[in-house]
Amino acid sequence: MASRPTDSPRRAAYEILLRVDEGAYADLVLDSTLTRSQLDSRDRGLVTELVYGVLRLRGRIDFALEQFCARQLKRLQPEVLRLLRLGAYQLLELDRVPAHAAVNSTVELAREVKLEKAAGLINGVLRSLERGKAQIDWPAPENIRRYLQHVCSMPVWLTKEVMRILPNAEARALGEALAAAAPQSLRANTLKIERGPLLEALSEAGHQARPCGYAPDGIVLEQRGEARLPGDLEGWYQVQDEASMLIALLLDARPGQRILDGCAAPGGKTTHLAALTGNQSEIIALDKHPQRVELIRQGAQRLGCTCIEARDWDLTAPADFLAPQSFDRVLLDAPCSGLGVLRRNPESRWNKSAVNIRELAALQPVLLANVAPLVRPGGKLLYSVCTFTAQETDEVVSRFLAENPQFALEDLRSHVPPGWTELLTESGCLRTFPHRHAGMDAFFAARFVRQLSECGRPIGPPRHKNNP
């Protein structure tokens, strides 16, 4: 009987990569496939490794394949190239997979997916790669552009962007960090359990974990055991990067406040705000897509967050159902290029471009302009993105301040724990990088406060002489 995609880890990985090439999100397809599969924990781990590894290191893999394939890779059938990348990743990156197993399983998979005519080519290229991989002339680190492209697996447009914002040594370090697998981290859901008891439960279940260095409720999973993570069904934790955990903390939310999360899905920061306020705040969570709003609701239910009201709304238009100046705190975690989370969404390397950055940098000020009127005098507005481009960070901040004189940028250096100051810029904004800050994703955040005049009345833009 022929195996199904859910029966074989390599077949499953092949099918997931096919879906990603068609435009699907790797994490969603991977989760759906593994949920349906009968694979054991080791094979499930191999599927995850193959999918994320091939997507993350596609540039490096293709550079190696080009040394041993007589035909140009772009002239191969996409299905054949996908198989070659799967086999090459195992040969180049997975020492625990014997070379003969990597080659033979890939050739067998070619026959299984009706690519028998390509089996000989695949066998020949992969065997040549195995024999000659030690002699591949990889670009030297000093040749920064080619090193980023062919060793760190960055497309040309991304290479230019990284070199534009960082000196060569740091550009190389960032490239290397983004080419590595992302750390696994959890946020203890303090509505149900504190970090200490959760660490103890993880240890008892055979997992190796440690506290995060900055986020007070964060945990890094250094090595997972065979058992399921404790408290999964009970909502003891939320899977979340440490940099992402800092965002809700920077909003400075308090019990009793009215809070808006403007682009909330899938809800990790929203539920964190609920935990920080002990379910004693009123949180309105908006997202453009109804199906993603449902993710917020499901997450809130799992974690026991009872103070969140989620609904769909596209903030390219003002939220006219919300009263002006009615929120103490507003979070806008805006849609962005996502370059700071490439390790977790590696397909973004290959399906985005510099054009997308320009489009997003034009959208972000529109979203800010539509949430700013909702902030009370003395209230705070936090703008955050998981990227590092100047167009989506500093330039958005400068434009917002120029167009909204009733807001001032707060210097976060006087509002955070002493150990956090290395995470902040000279203007007091958050800016994290994985190569600088304990492997955290690259995030940016700026906090604005709506000012009061000396007499306690709100400051606003000048009124028209005919409209006092």
Image (tube, rainbow, N blue to C red):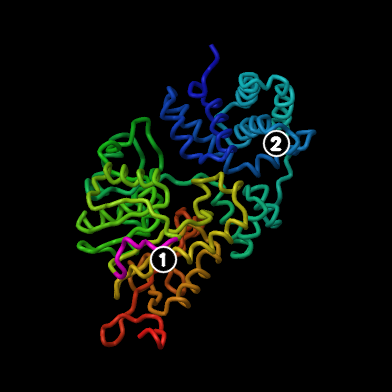
Question: Residue 377: horizontal and vertical position, in percent?
Answer: 30, 75
Q: CA distance from mark 2 to mark 1?
A: 54 Å
In this view, the mark in front (2 or 1): 1
Residue at point 63% right, 50% down? 154
Q: Which residue is mark 1?
A: 370
- Looking at the image, residue 307 sits to the left or right of residue 340; the answer is left
Write down the quadrant of residue 17 in the picture: top right
User: What span is in magenta?
Assistant: 317-325
Residue at point 33% right, 36% down? 229
Q: Count up the numbered dots.
A: 2
Question: Residue 72: horizontal and vertical position, in percent?
Answer: 77, 37
Tell me the quadrant of the picture where the C terminus can be found.
Answer: bottom left
Instruction: Give the mark, 2 or 1, whose residue is nearer the N terminus.
Output: 2
Magenta stretch: helix, strand or loop mostly: loop
Q: Which residue is mark 2?
A: 133
- Mark 1: amino acid: Asn
Query: Relative to the observer, which residue lies in front, 189 or 174?
Result: 189
Q: Is residue 423 visible?
A: no
Write down the quadrant of residue 303 in the picture: top left
Query: Relative to the observer, which residue lies in front, 277 or 187?
Result: 277
How many other residues sit within 10 Å of disc 2, few (<14), some (14-19) or many (≥20)?
some
Relative to 307, does residue 424 appear above or below in the rendering?
below
Relative to 138, does residue 71 appear above or below in the rendering?
above
- Looking at the image, residue 246 sits to the left or right of residue 390; the answer is left
Q: Secondary structure at mark 1?
A: helix
- Looking at the image, residue 310 sits to the left or right of residue 122; the answer is left
Query: Relative to the observer, which residue lies in front, 422 or 320?
Result: 320
- Mark 2: amino acid: Lys
Relative to 116, does residue 241 appear above or below in the rendering?
below
Is residue 460 shown in magenta? Answer: no
How many other residues sit within 10 Å of disc 1, few (<14), some (14-19) or many (≥20)?
some
Residue at point 19% right, 57% down? 280
